[in-house]
Image (spheres, rainbow, N blue to C red):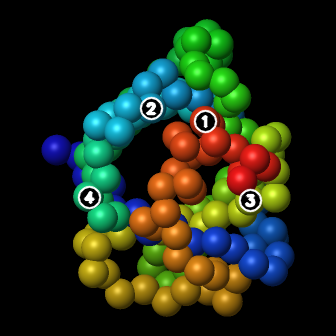
Amino acid sequence: MAIEIERKFLVHGDTWRDAPAVYYSQGYLSRAKERTVRVRIAGEDAFLTIKGISMGATRAEFEYPIPVWDARELLALCEQPLIEKYRRKIPCEGFVWEVDEFLGENSGLVVAEIELPAEDAVFNKPAWVGVEVTSDTRYYNSNLAAHPYSRW
């Protein structure tokens, strides 16, 4: 089984902006608690992703590349609004931080995620990484689609 172990943090400052950004557009065909089904276009690539229920920072994740044309058609079927963001990947001490700067109805929100080999893995946080929000479900992308940051 494919497993994702991911921790999520708020971001402050702007030194993280030096990394190149890729535009992402994603939507949800299902946002059920037991499973989410996401369609994503990331730059020139597209993916269909199925995620299971979260247990702490761990959940099942299955991701498959799909043609961009199909992804565009599937995004039209997704719940609205779509999630739009710029993602920057920033290597740091053997890990890669993914910093998402949200757009549209989630504008103003910046979140950093780190994927880990185990929930108790030790890592150092860069200076721009702030408060951890891993267990706060408001920050799940699937929830931001239904309850955008601008409406909190």
- Please tell me which of labels 2 and 4 falls first in the chain: 2
Residue type at mark 3 is Leu
Q: Residue at x 60, y 67 (%)?
A: 112
Crowding around mark 2 (Cα neighbors within 10 Å: few <14, some 14 to 19, many 20+) is some
Q: CA distance from mark 2 to mark 3?
A: 20 Å
- Residue bearing the label numbered 1: 146
Whether residue 45 is visible: no
Q: Nearer the viewer, residue 23 or 93?
A: 23
What is the number of the mark on residue 109? 3
The picture quadrant where one finds residue 79 is top right
- Please tell me which of labels 3 and 4 falls first in the chain: 4
Assign a secondary structure to mark 4: loop
Residue type at mark 4 is Met
What is the number of the mark on residue 46? none
- Please tell me which of labels 2 and 3 falls first in the chain: 2
- Residue bearing the label numbered 4: 55
Residue 124 against residue 38 in the figure, above or below: below
Residue 133 against residue 93 in the figure, above or below: above
Residue type at mark 1 is Ala
Q: Nearer the viewer, residue 140 or 6?
A: 140
- Residue bearing the label numbered 2: 31
Assign a secondary structure to mark 2: loop
Tag 2 near tag 1, CB within 8 Å: yes
